[in-house]
Amino acid sequence: MTSHILKSNLYVDNLLVTSNSTEFLKRTYSESLDKMKQGGFCLHSWNSNDPELLAIMQNDGSLASHGNNYEKVLGVNYFMENDSIQLSDNVLGPSANTKRSILSQISKVFDPLGLLLPVTTKGKFIMKELWDLSVAWDEEVPAHIKKNWSKHSSDLTQLPSISLPRSCISLESENSLCIFCDASKSCYGFAIYNVSIGISRLMFAKSRVPPVKTKTLPMLELMGGFLSVKMLA
């Protein structure tokens, strides 16, 4: 089991493991250290929201010592104390006034689960309009796009202040997976929720803007449905 976890749960230099069993987590922690050490790799800077495991890490001297109350994982800040996540702070540069600089600023915001798509998708709208207008990469963008980008960049800087619960599945009741997909002329996509005890939590979402060659609305709705089924796994 631990070998499989090491093969499938390593992302660049981060190992991510989640479980509701403290014993499983302690065993995985110990075996991961041993197995990686055999290959000459020393796993360090560990952290967890489980008190027992934290005590073991502290005793082993492997506990993260960077002084922050969160861990950075794949562009997301994870706060162990209240089991919540926030997007990492993204320092946006000076005013962007070309297609290249706007795309560069948009790319700094990394939301792998699509939890904040209502805000981040607006950047895709701006880029699509630039393509529709055939604006060159280093050409100054029109005044109305500068205005839209100024408002959007202001919204982007506030995203890291939004705290979201990491846990979204209940062990005390049945869980239902609900998928909603839809489309409009400007965007199509889906959102996946887990519903338990009358409470729904967003798990994953994705949006895309239509291709430059405009599709019919029924076709876009079909593309939204196809995208949701494709990403379900």
Image: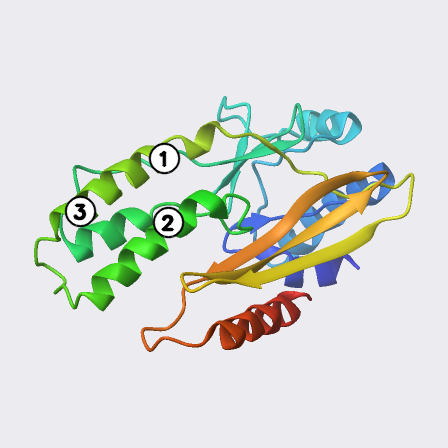
Looking at the picture, how far across and down is residue 3, in whole percent?
A: 73, 61
For the residue pair 40 and 55, the one nearer the viewer reads as 55
Is residue 56 among what the camera can see?
Answer: yes
For the residue pair 49 and 190, the one nearer the viewer reads as 190
Q: Is there CB contact under 8 Å for labels 3 and 2? A: no
Element under disc 1? helix
Mark 2 belongs to which amino acid? Lys
Residue at x 40%, y 61% (from the top left corner): 186
Q: Which residue is mark 3?
A: 144
Q: How is the image coloured?
A: rainbow
Mark 2 Cα shell of 10 Å, populated few (<14), some (14-19), many (≥20): many
The residues tagged by marks 1 and 2 sit, at their Cα atoms, a distance apart of 10 Å
Q: Which residue is mark 2?
A: 122
Element under disc 3? helix
Marks 3, 1: nearer the viewer:
3
Q: Earlier in the sequence, mark 3 or mark 2?
A: 2
Looking at the picture, how far across and down is residue 98, in whole percent?
A: 14, 53
Q: Quadrant of the N terminus?
A: bottom right
Residue 198 vertical position relative to residue 111 in the rendered view, above or below: above
For the residue pair 9 and 91, the one nearer the viewer reads as 91
Looking at the picture, how far across and down is residue 55, in whole percent?
A: 74, 25
Residue 15 vertical position relative to residue 170 in the rendered view, above or below: below
Q: Quadrant of the C terminus?
A: bottom right
Residue found at the far front of this picture: 217
Residue at x 36%, y 35% (from the top left corner): 155
Q: Which residue is mark 1?
A: 155
Q: Is there CB contact under 8 Å for labels 1 and 2? A: yes
Q: Earlier in the sequence, mark 3 or mark 1?
A: 3
Q: Earlier in the sequence, mark 1 or mark 2?
A: 2
The residues tagged by marks 3 and 1 sit, at their Cα atoms, a distance apart of 17 Å
Residue 179 vertical position relative to residue 223 in the rendered view, above or below: above
Residue at x 63%, y 28% (from the top left corner): 61
